[in-house]
Image (cartoon, rainbow, N blue to C red):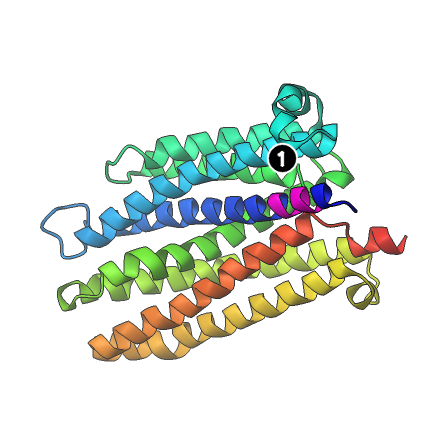
Amino acid sequence: MNGDFDFLWLAQVVFGAWSDTAFACALGAALFDAWLCGERAHAVVSPAHRGWRHAARAGTVAAITFVACNFVCLWLQAAAMSGSPVSDAGASLWLVATSTQAGIGWLVALAGGLVIVLACATGRPQGASKTGFAIFGALVAAAGKAAIGHAADAGAFSLAEAVQTLHLLATGVWGGIVIVGALAVLPALGTSVARASLICIVARMSRAATLAVIVIIATGVFNAWRGTDGAAAVLVDSNWGHALIVKTGLVLAALALGALNRWSVLPRLQRTASTMDAHTVINVMRLEAVLMLCVFATASVLSHGVPGAALAG
């Protein structure tokens, strides 16, 4: 393995993780936009208006970042498939994009990203049609990304690709609402006059995250079974298995923090509506957001590595 290959692999992992994070944040911001519009936070006089503006801005930035990262990922894929230096990969970009399954997958993901950009960048309150447009874009983008990874080995439009699409969507919902919520929206709702909106939004987040986690667990078990071919020894005998163990540990830690917020901190905030409990909810979610960023990083390592079952075979 030469230095150029190492650099190319590392670049693919970094931009893959960045792309997944941006996708999640765009999806999470779109949900916050819809929820806050339900609270009429788009009105300038609303105490939660600042939170709505942060959600709208985060969605636009994340969607544009997702499109940019996916273009870079396609460029890196062209370099990997053509064997040319990264600086010269543009010569084979169109050929890779139109004649390979991975390239077509990237184009589909890019198209979905552009739909999300159009949905998020209008700056207007999130109506039902705008929310539906953003969700449709997310579905297209997730399907494109599923056609790039290991699920594509089972063939186009296979069960594995469908499961991976659901996995990416559910992970995007969970990770997106946690990251955008912890870093942008909830701190903007931390004032006492916006406390009612904060409590309502955190409760919505908790319900959405619970549903997303159920899907993540079901699809994650399926993907892990495919990656190991049902052989537990793969987990300890391969670097891919080690990465899967790390990712599982990170997900479990994030689940523990989410459970702490849902079953302990949030009920206390609903009873007291105190500033201290509001800050506790946000701080716990910030820790969860850090773990979710690490989850996206390890997921990118897994998607750019060879599954343990293939190595064992």
Return the residue nearer the eye: 303 or 88. Answer: 88
* SS for callout 1: helix
Which quadrant holds residue 200?
Answer: bottom left
> What is the three-letter code of the residue carrying label 1?
Leu
- On the image, the x and y values in percent for residue 84 come to 71, 29
The reply, left or right, for residue 151 in relation to residue 117 is right
Q: Main secondary structure of the magenta part?
A: helix
Q: Residue furthest right?
A: 313
Residue 35 x/y as whole percent = 30, 51
| Residue at (47, 34) in percent of width and height | 67
Numbered disc total = 1
Q: Where is residue 264 drawn, in percent x and y?
A: 38, 79
Is residue 54 toward the left or the right of residue 232 in the image? Answer: left
* Horizontal side, residue 182 vs residue 174: left or right: left
Q: Residues within 10 Å of mark 1 (few under 14, many from 20)?
A: many
Residue 157, percent across and down? 69, 34
Please tell me which residue is depicted at 27% across the width and 77% down the height of the picture.
277
| Quadrant of residue 297 within the rendered picture | bottom right
Q: Which residues are magenta?
A: 6-11
Residue depicted at 63% across the width and 32% down the height: 86
Reading the image, the residue beneath label 1 is 76
Magenta residue check for 300: no
Q: Is residue 163 visible?
A: no
Query: Quarter-wise, where is residue 295 in the image?
Result: bottom right
**What is the residue that sits farthest to the front in this orientation?**
3
> Does residue 43 lie above or below 189 as drawn?
above
Q: Is residue 132 visible?
A: yes
Q: Residue at x 29, y 44 (%)?
A: 56
Q: Tell me: 300 left or right of 159.
A: left
